[in-house]
């Protein structure tokens, strides 16, 4: 999307009309003065000076150069000079805006270049989940997809079968907790704004969202990535803030089914860094969090979101075993009532580095693309 600060056409037209009127007045005065007798030239000079003063109020450049005439400089016409300055000013404004447009176009071309240069994930790579002191817990399995059910919902085979029909053309990515960040690395070192938080979007979970955006776009998906800081300056009310944002976006884009709220695991312990080695790369593990019908906002179709998560994770398990941790199912709705394929995806934890999370997005995008074909 290009933000272009361009001077209003209406303002340009107004400016040109003013200049035209001034020129007409000047021509009329010149014609009139040529027919005036010599004995009233002094009076005419007074009138012209008054005219110049009036024009100076409309065209400030004339007022600024009138002083030169008063110093009796030879062959100096303040009206002509002033008009030329005004035209130069108008041209300068237009040129500045053209430069701004060019800069925005260059930025857009750079973003396009990033997508074109995005390295897509390979398949057939060996994977190995790295050791962790935090045990993996789950209560249910469906075709190898593990689910930690923290509700009393009975997860039947029918409920888990990913027979869901969704629009895959457009994808929305946003961040309820946009300031969540990771452990600094040699490549990505930042100054925290809070406890594992930063408002610098180049180092927070927003940066992870950008990578997922680029990856999905490289596969041909149309992605809307919203970078609003819904948890800053106040963490309280984050979900209320993000719901407003998402609702407005979906009202303008009714054909979006896939809605991803991208987070980081909330555990504030650097010793916890869930990681999987894929080929020669280390990627932060990923986890779906699915909300039920336990919030104030009714969400009776929560199972559709679960089916979507199962669909993606089932494919990911075949391509990159260990990329995903067990899906967590909770009563809280997490605003997932907005769509039938709305999910929270938690990428890594505080112990992971940004480097590892960016690697994760490469493999997540590949798994999504394979699952959504």
Image (cartoon, rainbow, N blue to C red):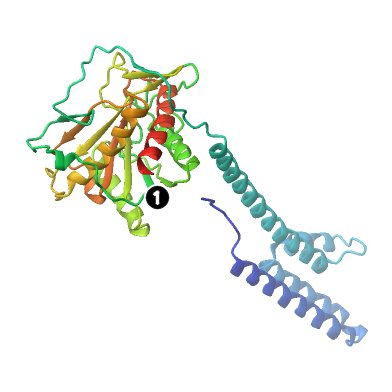
Q: Residue 57 placed where, x, y %?
A: 66, 67
Please say if 185 is above or below 31. Answer: above
Secondary structure under tag 1 reads strand
Which image quadrant for residue 11? bottom right
Q: How many marks?
A: 1
Which image quadrant for residue 93? bottom right
| Residue behind mark 1 | 170
Foreground residue among 171 and 246? 171
Q: Is residue 233 visible?
A: no
Please say if 272 is above or below 170. Answer: above
Foreground residue among 358 and 180? 358
The answer to whether residue 278 is left or right of residue 29 is left
The answer to whether residue 185 is left or right of residue 69 is left
Packing grade of label 1 (10 A; few <14, some 14-19, many >=20) is some
Q: Is residue 219 visible?
A: yes
> Which residue shows up at 27% across the image and 13% down it?
132
> Which residue shows up at 28% across the image and 46% down it?
341
> Which residue shows up at 14% across the image and 50% down it?
298
Identify the image quadrant of the C terminus: top left
Q: Residue furthest left?
A: 152
Q: Residue 113 placed where, x, y %?
A: 59, 39
Which image quadrant for residue 20? bottom right
The answer to whether residue 363 is left or right of residue 289 is right
> Which residue shows up at 51% across the image and 50% down it?
1
Q: Residue 221 placed where, x, y %?
A: 44, 46
Q: Residue 41 placed where, x, y %?
A: 88, 80
């Amino acid at each position: 999307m290009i933000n272009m600060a361009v001077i209003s056409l209406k303002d340009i037209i107004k400016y040109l009309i003013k200049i035209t009127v001034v020129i007409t007045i000047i021509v009329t005065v010149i014609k009139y003065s040529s027919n005036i007798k010599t004995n009233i030239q002094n009076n005419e000079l007074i009138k012209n000076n008054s005219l110049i003063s009036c024009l100076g109020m409309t065209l400030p450049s004339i007022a600024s150069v009138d002083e030169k005439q008063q110093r009796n400089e030879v062959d100096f016409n303040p009206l002509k000079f002033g008009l030329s300055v005004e035209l130069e000013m108008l041209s300068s404004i237009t040129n500045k805006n053209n430069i701004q447009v060019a800069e925005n176009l260059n930025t857009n071309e750079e973003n396009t270049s990033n997508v074109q240069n995005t390295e897509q994930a390979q398949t057939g790579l060996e994977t190995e989940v790295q050791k962790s002191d935090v045990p993996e817990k789950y209560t249910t399995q469906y075709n190898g997809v593990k689910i930690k059910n923290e509700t009393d919902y009975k997860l039947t085979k029918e409920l888990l079968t990913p027979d869901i029909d969704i629009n895959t053309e457009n994808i929305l990515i946003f961040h309820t907790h946009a300031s969540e960040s990771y452990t600094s690395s040699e490549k990505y070192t930042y100054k925290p704004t809070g406890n594992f938080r930063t408002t610098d979007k180049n180092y927070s979970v927003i940066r992870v969202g950008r990578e997922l955006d680029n990856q999905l776009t490289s596969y041909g998906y149309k992605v809307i990535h919203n970078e609003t800081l819904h948890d800053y300056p106040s963490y309280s009310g984050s979900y209320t803030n993000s719901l407003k944002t998402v609702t407005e976006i979906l009202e303008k884009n009714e054909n979006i089914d896939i809605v991803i709220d991208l987070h980081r695991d909330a555990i504030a312990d650097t010793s916890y860094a869930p990681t999987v080695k894929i080929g020669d790369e280390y990627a932060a593990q990923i986890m779906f969090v699915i909300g039920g019908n336990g919030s104030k906002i009714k969400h009776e179709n929560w199972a559709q979101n679960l089916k979507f998560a199962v669909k993606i994770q089932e494919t990911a398990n075949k391509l990159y075993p260990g990329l995903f941790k067990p899906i967590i199912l909770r009563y809280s709705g997490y605003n997932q009532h907005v769509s039938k394929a709305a999910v929270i995806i938690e990428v890594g934890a505080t112990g992971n580095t940004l480097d590892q999370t960016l690697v994760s997005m490469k493999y997540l995008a590949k798994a999504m693309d394979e699952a959504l074909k």
